[in-house]
Amino acid sequence: MAGRHRGTEGPEAYDTHSAPIMRPFVAALLDAVDLRLGDRVLDLACGTGFAARAALALVGPTGRVRGADVDEGMVRVARDRGPQIDLTVAPADRLPYDDSSFDAVVCQQGAQFFPDLTAALTEAARVTRPGGRLAVTVWAPLDRQPYFLAHERALRRYAPDALRYFVRAYVRTADQLTTALEAAGYRDIAHREVTSAVALPSLDAYAYDHLATLWGGLLREAGGEEAVTAAARLVRDELAARTAPDGTATLPFTVLLVRATR
C-alpha cells in the first residue's frame, strides 16, 4: 500500500526487514477469517504479499489467492516472491473483480492509508460473497509500540517533516472501522487487540536497515546520510534497556484486529 514507507531502499528491503514484525499478525489475521481448503481469498492492499503468501498455504491447490495494491513496486515484489498468486495494481476503492468473487477478504496494515475508508470497505463488501468473512489489522496507538515510538523520537529529532506521514499508521480506531464496515454492509463486527512479543535481529544492523527502508529518503533530505546514521543510533539507545547482550531485542507490538461477516 502506498504510504507504507518513504525509504530509498525499495520494496524488496521493505519485505525483508518488515517480515519479522509482520509475521505473527499475519497469522492472527488469517486465523480470524477461518480459511479452509478451496477458499477464494483477496489480500486487499497486499503490499509485498505477506498475507497472500501465507493464505496460499492454507487454501491449498484447490483454492485461489489474489492480491491488489495501488503501489506498483510493492506488487512487483509480491509477484517475484509469490508467483502462484494472481496480483494486480489497483486502488482499494476500484477493484477489478466481479461481485461476490471471494470467500474471504483480508487487509493487513493497509486500512489506515485508505483516502476514503468507507469507499474502500464498500468495495471490499461488493467482492465478498454473502456470508463471506473479512478481517483487518491496523497498528494500535503509538504509545503501545516501544519500537515504533523509538522511530518517532528519531524522526522528531532528525526529520520532523516526516512525522506527518509517520503518524498516519497509528490513528485508525475501532470505532472508525466499525462505522465504515456497518456503512459498507458488513455485520457481526467484532474487534480485539492482539499483542505479540517479536524477536528482532541484532539492532546494531537492524535499527539502521529498517529505519532506512521506511524513512531513509526523508532522513537524507533533511540531513544526508549522517541523519540516517544518527537516527538509527538514537533508536538503539532508546531500546538499550530492552536489548540482550547479543544485540537482539524482543519487543511487544500490538495491533487492532477487526473481523466481520458479509
Image: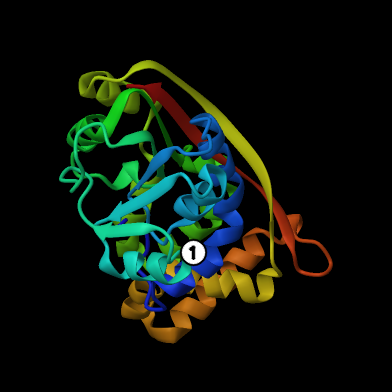
What residue do we see at 35% from left, 65% from top?
Answer: 74
Residue 84, image x, y percentages: 43, 61
Q: Is residue 147 left or right of residue 13?
A: right
What residue do we see at 48% from left, 66% from top?
Answer: 15
What residue do we see at 26% from left, 59% from top?
Answer: 88
Residue 251, image x, y percentages: 68, 50
Visible residue check, residue 77? yes
Q: Does 173 appear above or below 46?
A: above
Residue at the farthest right position? 245
Q: Is residue 152 left or right of residue 177?
A: right
Residue at the farthest front position? 62
Which image quadrant for residue 28?
Answer: top right
What is the total number of numbered labels drawn onto the structure image? Answer: 1
* Quadrant the C terminus occupies: top left
Q: Nearer the viewer, residue 118 or 124?
A: 124
Visible residue check, residue 3? no
Q: Is residue 212 left or right of residue 69?
A: right
Q: Does 201 appear above or below 42?
A: below
Residue at the farthest bottom position? 225
Residue 43, image x, y percentages: 38, 47
* Quadrant the N terminus occupies: bottom left
- The amino acid type, in three-letter code, at marker 1 is Ala
What residue do we see at 51% from left, 35% from top?
Answer: 35
CA neighbours of label 1 inside 10 A, class few (<14), some (14 to 19), many (20+)? many
Which residue bears the numbered disc 1?
A: 154
